[in-house]
Image (cartoon, grey):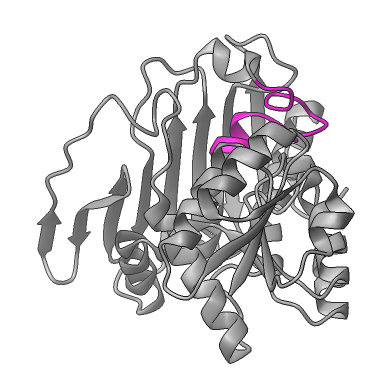
Protein backbone atom coordinates (compact mmCIF):
# COMPACT_ATOMS: atom_id res chain seq x y z
CA UNK A 1 0.00 0.00 0.00
CA UNK A 2 1.43 3.34 -1.10
CA UNK A 3 -0.12 6.20 0.82
CA UNK A 4 -0.11 9.90 0.07
CA UNK A 5 -0.37 12.41 2.90
CA UNK A 6 -2.62 15.42 2.43
CA UNK A 7 -1.35 17.95 4.92
CA UNK A 8 2.09 18.44 6.41
CA UNK A 9 1.27 19.54 9.95
CA UNK A 10 1.35 17.69 13.26
CA UNK A 11 -1.36 15.14 12.53
CA UNK A 12 0.06 14.31 9.10
CA UNK A 13 3.41 13.70 10.76
CA UNK A 14 1.59 11.19 12.99
CA UNK A 15 -0.04 9.59 9.94
CA UNK A 16 3.38 9.30 8.32
CA UNK A 17 4.97 7.65 11.36
CA UNK A 18 2.04 5.26 11.64
CA UNK A 19 2.19 4.27 7.98
CA UNK A 20 5.97 3.81 8.02
CA UNK A 21 5.68 1.39 10.95
CA UNK A 22 3.59 -1.07 8.92
CA UNK A 23 5.36 -3.71 6.85
CA UNK A 24 4.61 -3.32 3.17
CA UNK A 25 3.32 0.25 3.54
CA UNK A 26 5.16 3.35 2.36
CA UNK A 27 4.52 7.07 2.11
CA UNK A 28 4.58 7.87 -1.60
CA UNK A 29 3.94 11.61 -1.65
CA UNK A 30 3.11 14.57 0.57
CA UNK A 31 0.93 17.55 -0.26
CA UNK A 32 0.96 20.75 1.77
CA UNK A 33 0.28 24.38 1.03
CA UNK A 34 3.42 25.18 2.99
CA UNK A 35 6.04 23.86 0.60
CA UNK A 36 8.84 23.79 3.16
CA UNK A 37 6.79 21.71 5.62
CA UNK A 38 5.78 19.34 2.84
CA UNK A 39 9.39 18.93 1.75
CA UNK A 40 10.58 18.24 5.31
CA UNK A 41 7.91 15.60 5.88
CA UNK A 42 8.49 14.02 2.47
CA UNK A 43 12.22 13.83 3.09
CA UNK A 44 11.63 11.82 6.27
CA UNK A 45 9.87 9.13 4.24
CA UNK A 46 11.76 9.26 0.96
CA UNK A 47 8.60 10.61 -0.67
CA UNK A 48 7.84 13.30 -3.25
CA UNK A 49 6.64 16.71 -2.01
CA UNK A 50 3.98 18.80 -3.74
CA UNK A 51 2.39 22.16 -3.09
CA UNK A 52 -0.17 21.66 -5.88
CA UNK A 53 -3.05 19.31 -5.10
CA UNK A 54 -3.75 18.21 -8.66
CA UNK A 55 -0.14 17.25 -9.29
CA UNK A 56 -0.04 15.43 -5.97
CA UNK A 57 -3.18 13.43 -6.80
CA UNK A 58 -1.69 12.49 -10.18
CA UNK A 59 1.41 11.04 -8.48
CA UNK A 60 2.12 7.45 -9.49
CA UNK A 61 2.17 4.95 -7.95
CA UNK A 62 -0.24 5.80 -5.13
CA UNK A 63 -3.13 3.72 -3.77
CA UNK A 64 -4.69 5.79 -0.99
CA UNK A 65 -4.52 9.12 0.81
CA UNK A 66 -4.51 9.95 4.51
CA UNK A 67 -6.06 13.38 4.96
CA UNK A 68 -4.76 15.60 7.74
CA UNK A 69 -5.58 19.02 6.34
CA UNK A 70 -7.77 21.52 8.27
CA UNK A 71 -11.14 19.99 9.11
CA UNK A 72 -13.12 22.25 6.80
CA UNK A 73 -11.14 20.96 3.80
CA UNK A 74 -11.49 17.23 4.50
CA UNK A 75 -14.43 16.54 2.18
CA UNK A 76 -13.10 18.68 -0.66
CA UNK A 77 -9.74 16.91 -0.56
CA UNK A 78 -11.37 13.49 -0.18
CA UNK A 79 -13.69 14.06 -3.12
CA UNK A 80 -10.80 14.97 -5.41
CA UNK A 81 -8.90 11.87 -4.30
CA UNK A 82 -11.90 9.59 -4.81
CA UNK A 83 -12.32 10.93 -8.33
CA UNK A 84 -8.76 9.75 -9.03
CA UNK A 85 -9.69 6.26 -7.82
CA UNK A 86 -7.74 6.63 -4.58
CA UNK A 87 -8.99 5.14 -1.31
CA UNK A 88 -9.59 7.82 1.33
CA UNK A 89 -8.75 7.71 5.04
CA UNK A 90 -9.61 11.03 6.66
CA UNK A 91 -8.75 12.50 10.05
CA UNK A 92 -11.67 13.27 12.36
CA UNK A 93 -14.07 14.91 11.90
CA UNK A 94 -14.96 13.65 8.44
CA UNK A 95 -15.75 17.32 7.74
CA UNK A 96 -17.45 20.13 9.65
CA UNK A 97 -20.99 19.71 8.23
CA UNK A 98 -23.15 16.72 7.43
CA UNK A 99 -23.81 18.14 3.97
CA UNK A 100 -20.10 17.97 3.12
CA UNK A 101 -19.80 14.55 4.73
CA UNK A 102 -22.68 13.30 2.59
CA UNK A 103 -21.01 14.63 -0.55
CA UNK A 104 -17.80 12.76 0.28
CA UNK A 105 -19.65 9.54 1.10
CA UNK A 106 -21.53 9.74 -2.21
CA UNK A 107 -18.36 10.40 -4.22
CA UNK A 108 -16.51 7.49 -2.62
CA UNK A 109 -19.44 5.20 -3.35
CA UNK A 110 -19.70 6.41 -6.95
CA UNK A 111 -16.02 5.72 -7.60
CA UNK A 112 -16.00 2.47 -5.61
CA UNK A 113 -13.21 3.43 -3.26
CA UNK A 114 -13.03 2.79 0.46
CA UNK A 115 -13.70 5.67 2.84
CA UNK A 116 -12.60 5.55 6.47
CA UNK A 117 -12.29 8.00 9.36
CA UNK A 118 -9.56 8.17 11.99
CA UNK A 119 -11.63 7.39 15.09
CA UNK A 120 -8.84 5.34 16.62
CA UNK A 121 -10.51 5.04 20.03
CA UNK A 122 -12.80 2.37 18.55
CA UNK A 123 -9.77 0.09 18.27
CA UNK A 124 -8.44 0.56 21.79
CA UNK A 125 -8.72 -2.65 23.86
CA UNK A 126 -10.55 -0.96 26.74
CA UNK A 127 -13.14 0.57 24.43
CA UNK A 128 -13.65 -2.68 22.55
CA UNK A 129 -14.31 -4.40 25.86
CA UNK A 130 -16.93 -1.78 26.69
CA UNK A 131 -18.55 -2.39 23.31
CA UNK A 132 -18.64 -6.14 23.96
CA UNK A 133 -20.22 -5.63 27.41
CA UNK A 134 -22.98 -3.56 25.80
CA UNK A 135 -23.53 -5.78 22.76
CA UNK A 136 -23.59 -9.00 24.79
CA UNK A 137 -26.14 -7.52 27.19
CA UNK A 138 -23.84 -7.83 30.21
CA UNK A 139 -24.39 -4.21 31.20
CA UNK A 140 -28.12 -4.56 30.62
CA UNK A 141 -30.38 -1.94 29.07
CA UNK A 142 -28.50 1.38 28.85
CA UNK A 143 -29.92 3.94 31.26
CA UNK A 144 -27.43 6.76 31.74
CA UNK A 145 -24.21 7.96 30.12
CA UNK A 146 -21.79 10.73 31.00
CA UNK A 147 -19.01 12.02 28.77
CA UNK A 148 -16.41 14.49 30.03
CA UNK A 149 -13.62 16.06 27.99
CA UNK A 150 -12.37 18.83 30.26
CA UNK A 151 -9.06 19.73 28.66
CA UNK A 152 -6.75 22.72 28.63
CA UNK A 153 -5.24 24.39 25.61
CA UNK A 154 -3.01 27.42 26.18
CA UNK A 155 -3.66 30.58 24.13
CA UNK A 156 -0.77 29.84 21.77
CA UNK A 157 -2.49 26.63 20.66
CA UNK A 158 -4.99 28.82 18.81
CA UNK A 159 -2.78 31.86 18.25
CA UNK A 160 -0.18 29.82 16.39
CA UNK A 161 -2.66 28.40 13.87
CA UNK A 162 -4.48 29.98 10.95
CA UNK A 163 -7.40 27.59 11.19
CA UNK A 164 -7.88 26.36 14.76
CA UNK A 165 -10.68 28.13 16.59
CA UNK A 166 -12.41 29.30 13.38
CA UNK A 167 -15.85 28.40 12.09
CA UNK A 168 -14.68 28.24 8.48
CA UNK A 169 -11.92 25.64 8.89
CA UNK A 170 -12.29 24.16 12.40
CA UNK A 171 -16.08 24.04 12.26
CA UNK A 172 -16.32 24.81 15.97
CA UNK A 173 -14.21 24.51 19.07
CA UNK A 174 -14.00 22.01 21.91
CA UNK A 175 -17.01 20.05 20.64
CA UNK A 176 -16.08 19.68 16.98
CA UNK A 177 -12.33 19.33 17.45
CA UNK A 178 -11.38 17.76 20.78
CA UNK A 179 -14.57 16.14 22.09
CA UNK A 180 -15.84 14.59 18.87
CA UNK A 181 -13.92 11.37 19.65
CA UNK A 182 -16.02 10.94 22.78
CA UNK A 183 -19.24 11.82 20.95
CA UNK A 184 -18.38 9.05 18.49
CA UNK A 185 -17.81 6.57 21.32
CA UNK A 186 -21.14 7.38 22.96
CA UNK A 187 -22.92 6.83 19.65
CA UNK A 188 -20.98 3.61 18.98
CA UNK A 189 -21.80 2.22 22.41
CA UNK A 190 -25.37 3.47 22.91
CA UNK A 191 -26.78 4.08 19.45
CA UNK A 192 -28.24 7.21 17.89
CA UNK A 193 -29.15 10.38 19.76
CA UNK A 194 -32.60 11.77 18.95
CA UNK A 195 -32.53 15.10 20.79
CA UNK A 196 -29.99 17.41 22.43
CA UNK A 197 -30.10 20.48 24.63
CA UNK A 198 -26.83 22.40 24.78
CA UNK A 199 -25.13 25.58 25.96
CA UNK A 200 -21.78 26.85 24.73
CA UNK A 201 -19.49 29.70 25.76
CA UNK A 202 -16.17 31.24 24.82
CA UNK A 203 -14.92 31.57 28.37
CA UNK A 204 -11.16 32.02 28.15
CA UNK A 205 -9.67 32.05 24.66
CA UNK A 206 -9.85 34.83 22.10
CA UNK A 207 -11.39 32.68 19.37
CA UNK A 208 -14.53 32.66 17.21
CA UNK A 209 -15.85 29.38 18.55
CA UNK A 210 -16.64 27.77 21.90
CA UNK A 211 -14.04 26.64 24.39
CA UNK A 212 -16.66 25.46 26.92
CA UNK A 213 -19.82 23.42 26.33
CA UNK A 214 -22.39 21.32 28.18
CA UNK A 215 -25.22 19.22 26.77
CA UNK A 216 -28.01 16.83 27.67
CA UNK A 217 -28.49 13.92 25.25
CA UNK A 218 -31.63 11.85 24.71
CA UNK A 219 -30.78 8.54 23.03
CA UNK A 220 -33.23 6.84 20.70
CA UNK A 221 -32.99 3.70 22.84
CA UNK A 222 -34.25 5.55 25.90
CA UNK A 223 -31.02 6.30 27.74
CA UNK A 224 -30.16 9.81 28.90
CA UNK A 225 -26.72 11.38 28.77
CA UNK A 226 -24.75 14.40 29.85
CA UNK A 227 -21.74 15.81 28.07
CA UNK A 228 -19.05 18.33 28.98
CA UNK A 229 -16.36 19.62 26.64
CA UNK A 230 -13.74 22.28 27.19
CA UNK A 231 -10.33 23.54 26.24
CA UNK A 232 -10.63 26.11 29.04
CA UNK A 233 -10.32 23.74 32.03
CA UNK A 234 -6.89 24.35 33.53
CA UNK A 235 -4.80 22.28 34.16
CA UNK A 236 -6.69 19.66 32.16
CA UNK A 237 -8.30 16.43 33.31
CA UNK A 238 -8.48 12.88 31.96
CA UNK A 239 -11.20 12.16 29.44
CA UNK A 240 -13.92 10.18 31.21
CA UNK A 241 -16.87 8.16 29.93
CA UNK A 242 -19.35 6.45 32.25
CA UNK A 243 -22.09 4.10 31.05
CA UNK A 244 -24.77 2.76 33.39
CA UNK A 245 -27.18 0.05 32.38
CA UNK A 246 -29.77 -2.00 34.22
CA UNK A 247 -27.02 -4.53 34.90
CA UNK A 248 -24.28 -2.23 36.16
CA UNK A 249 -21.83 0.54 35.40
CA UNK A 250 -18.53 0.79 33.57
CA UNK A 251 -16.10 3.70 33.59
CA UNK A 252 -13.46 4.64 31.04
CA UNK A 253 -10.88 7.19 32.16
CA UNK A 254 -7.85 8.35 30.22
CA UNK A 255 -8.36 5.46 27.74
CA UNK A 256 -8.40 2.85 30.53
CA UNK A 257 -11.40 0.84 31.66
CA UNK A 258 -10.96 1.71 35.33
CA UNK A 259 -14.03 -0.03 36.77
CA UNK A 260 -16.78 -2.50 35.92
CA UNK A 261 -19.50 -3.07 38.53
CA UNK A 262 -22.10 -5.70 37.60
CA UNK A 263 -25.29 -6.04 39.65
CA UNK A 264 -26.32 -9.60 38.80
CA UNK A 265 -22.92 -11.16 39.32
CA UNK A 266 -22.15 -9.03 42.34
CA UNK A 267 -18.75 -8.48 40.83
CA UNK A 268 -16.52 -5.45 40.78
CA UNK A 269 -13.34 -4.86 38.83
CA UNK A 270 -10.87 -2.04 39.34
CA UNK A 271 -7.87 -0.91 37.37
CA UNK A 272 -5.11 1.31 38.70
CA UNK A 273 -5.31 4.37 36.49
CA UNK A 274 -2.43 6.73 37.27
CA UNK A 275 -2.94 9.99 35.42
CA UNK A 276 -0.21 12.43 34.58
CA UNK A 277 -1.04 16.10 34.23
CA UNK A 278 1.03 16.05 31.05
CA UNK A 279 -0.43 14.50 27.95
CA UNK A 280 -3.60 14.70 25.93
CA UNK A 281 -5.71 16.38 28.58
CA UNK A 282 -3.43 19.38 28.87
CA UNK A 283 -1.15 21.09 26.43
CA UNK A 284 -0.68 19.53 22.97
CA UNK A 285 2.02 16.92 22.69
CA UNK A 286 3.36 14.76 19.86
CA UNK A 287 0.66 12.21 19.22
CA UNK A 288 1.33 8.54 19.79
CA UNK A 289 1.27 6.94 16.35
CA UNK A 290 0.37 3.43 17.52
CA UNK A 291 -3.38 4.09 17.66
CA UNK A 292 -3.31 5.65 14.19
CA UNK A 293 -1.28 2.69 13.00
CA UNK A 294 -4.09 0.39 14.09
CA UNK A 295 -6.56 2.44 12.04
CA UNK A 296 -4.36 2.25 8.93
CA UNK A 297 -3.92 -1.50 9.36
CA UNK A 298 -7.67 -1.91 9.73
CA UNK A 299 -8.22 0.25 6.63
CA UNK A 300 -5.78 -1.81 4.57
CA UNK A 301 -7.61 -5.00 5.56
CA UNK A 302 -10.87 -3.40 4.46
CA UNK A 303 -9.36 -2.58 1.07
CA UNK A 304 -7.83 -6.03 0.60
CA UNK A 305 -10.95 -7.93 1.69
CA UNK A 306 -13.51 -5.51 0.23
CA UNK A 307 -15.00 -4.92 3.67
CA UNK A 308 -15.93 -1.82 5.65
CA UNK A 309 -13.28 -0.20 7.86
CA UNK A 310 -13.87 0.13 11.61
CA UNK A 311 -15.32 3.59 11.03
CA UNK A 312 -16.59 4.22 7.51
CA UNK A 313 -17.95 7.45 6.11
CA UNK A 314 -21.53 6.91 7.23
CA UNK A 315 -20.38 6.15 10.78
CA UNK A 316 -18.02 9.12 10.78
CA UNK A 317 -20.89 11.40 9.78
CA UNK A 318 -22.98 10.59 12.86
CA UNK A 319 -20.84 12.48 15.38
CA UNK A 320 -20.82 15.56 13.16
CA UNK A 321 -24.61 15.42 13.02
CA UNK A 322 -24.86 15.38 16.82
CA UNK A 323 -22.38 18.24 17.22
CA UNK A 324 -24.31 20.24 14.60
CA UNK A 325 -27.44 19.72 16.70
CA UNK A 326 -25.60 20.87 19.83
CA UNK A 327 -24.57 24.08 18.10
CA UNK A 328 -28.12 24.62 16.84
CA UNK A 329 -29.51 24.08 20.34
CA UNK A 330 -27.02 26.54 21.83
CA UNK A 331 -28.01 29.17 19.26
CA UNK A 332 -31.76 28.66 19.76
CA UNK A 333 -31.68 28.26 23.52
CA UNK A 334 -33.73 25.07 23.53
CA UNK A 335 -33.80 21.38 22.57
CA UNK A 336 -33.13 20.34 18.98
CA UNK A 337 -34.01 17.08 17.26
CA UNK A 338 -30.90 15.51 15.74
CA UNK A 339 -30.94 15.36 11.97
CA UNK A 340 -33.53 18.09 11.52
CA UNK A 341 -32.74 21.67 10.40
Please determine whether, in this image, residue 20 is positioned above or below residue 44. below
Question: Which quadrant of the structure image shows residue 285?
Answer: top left
Left or right of 235? Residue 220 is: right
Q: Residue 190: in sight, yes or no?
A: yes
Question: Which quadrant of the structure image shows residue 47?
Answer: bottom right
Determine the residue positioned at 63% across, 17% down.
160
Please determine whether, in this image, residue 243 is positioned above or below residue 109. above
Please determine whether, in this image, residue 196 is positioned above or below residue 223. above
- Image location (x, y in percent) of residue 301: 52, 81
- Image location (x, y in percent) of residue 85: 81, 75
Q: Residue 189: in sight, yes or no?
A: no
Determine the residue positioned at 66% across, 49% down.
93
The answer to whether residue 168 is magenta is: yes
**What predominant SS class does the magenta segment belong to?**
loop
The answer to whether residue 114 is magenta is: no
Range of residues picked out in magenta: 161-180
- Image location (x, y in percent) of residue 81: 81, 64
Q: Name the image quarter holding the N terminus.
A: bottom right
Amino acid sequence: MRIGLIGAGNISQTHGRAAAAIAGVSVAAVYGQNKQKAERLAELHGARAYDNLDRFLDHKPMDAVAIGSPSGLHAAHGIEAARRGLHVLVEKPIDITTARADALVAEARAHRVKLGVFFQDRLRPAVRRMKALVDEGTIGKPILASGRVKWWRPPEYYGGSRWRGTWALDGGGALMNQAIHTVDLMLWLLGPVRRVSARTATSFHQIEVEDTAVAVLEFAGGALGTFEAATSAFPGFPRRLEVTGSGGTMVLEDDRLVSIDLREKGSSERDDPPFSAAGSATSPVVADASAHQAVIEDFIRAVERDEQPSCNGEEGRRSVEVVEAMYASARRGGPVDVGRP
